[in-house]
Amino acid sequence: MGWIIVDIYQGINNFYSGWIWWNLFLAFIPMLLSFKLFRRKALSPFWFALACFGTALIGIVGLESRLPRLRRFASSIVRDIQTGDPGTLLQLLWLAGVMVIALGISIWLFKQSHTRKLWLWWIGLVTFIAFLPNAPYVLTDILHLIRGTSAGTIKIWVVAFIFIPMHMAAIIIGFEAYVIALLNVNFYLQQKGLQALAGPVEVSIHALCAFGVYLGRFIRLNSWDIVVDPSSVLAITLNTLTSKRPLVVIFFSFVLLMVLYWIMKQVTLGLKLRIHYAQMGQNALD
């Protein structure tokens, strides 16, 4: 029994770097926002708070593996400031300006209570759109499994019975967060009498997320780069949209998202219907 534990520990120690937890944390953020923005009554305050607490714990565990990278980033910022790098100084000036504007908006919203909820909803919507590509992004994390297990340093049985099930479960859960978020958007449109827009909105979101996944996987941008370094994001976006090869990759990602979303959507709705039948005391096979 001891050798089994040793093999699993050595495999995890050689391969696992915490990316599973961190990427799941980023995938859960837009899902939680979708309940707050589009389907408030679906979760009670207790269950929503519990979900937020669990997501925060996942983020803390995943952040541990990112600490060395954060330290290097902080050190580079300090070094650039000491050398008087103009790009870094402009970036810090921009962030200071954003913080001042955000503080001003917050004070204004506090005073204008009748418009506060509307403004907060739009701010939440922008945040939701910015973080939503992190949910389907987990599909690309299959690369970590391929790279980590192709070196031949991990026992075959550990790969087959531990790593593959663990990583596939993480990918499915992360993508399910994307499906639930879009179902909440559809529910909101239906409640507003805009059901005819559900299809076009879904297609638009798939296209936006396919583009976001490309920027995240191949260009290595993050959702917060929109605020931290918007000029670079804009330049990279324009360059990507005018290049043929990135557009081909984005197109295939778009098609993949549409197909997988449709499949998972049917599974999710089917499970929901099965649970409803069970609660009603009905047999789903009748």
Image (spheres, rainbow, N blue to C red):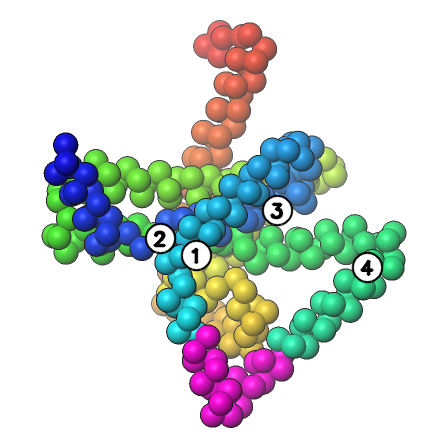
Determine the secondary structure under disc 2: loop
Residue for badge 2: 18
In the displayed structure image, the side of residue 135 where residue 197 appears, left or right: right
Q: Earlier in the sequence, mark 2 or mark 4?
A: 2
Vertical placement of 270 versus 285: above or below?
below
Determine the secondary structure under disc 4: helix
Q: Which mark is residue 109?
A: 4
Instruction: State the separation of the CA atoms marked 4 and 1.
Output: 32 Å
Q: Which residues are magenta?
A: 74-94
Q: Earlier in the sequence, mark 1 or mark 3?
A: 3
Crowd tier of the residue under label 4, counting other residues whose Cα lies within 10 Å: few below 14, some 14–19, many 20 or above: some
Q: Position of residue 57 (x, y in %)?
A: 48, 46
The reply to whether residue 198 is visible in this rendering is: no
> Which tag is nearer the camera, tag 4 or tag 1?
1
Tag 4: amino acid:
Leu
Instruction: State the separation of the CA atoms marked 1 and 3.
Output: 21 Å
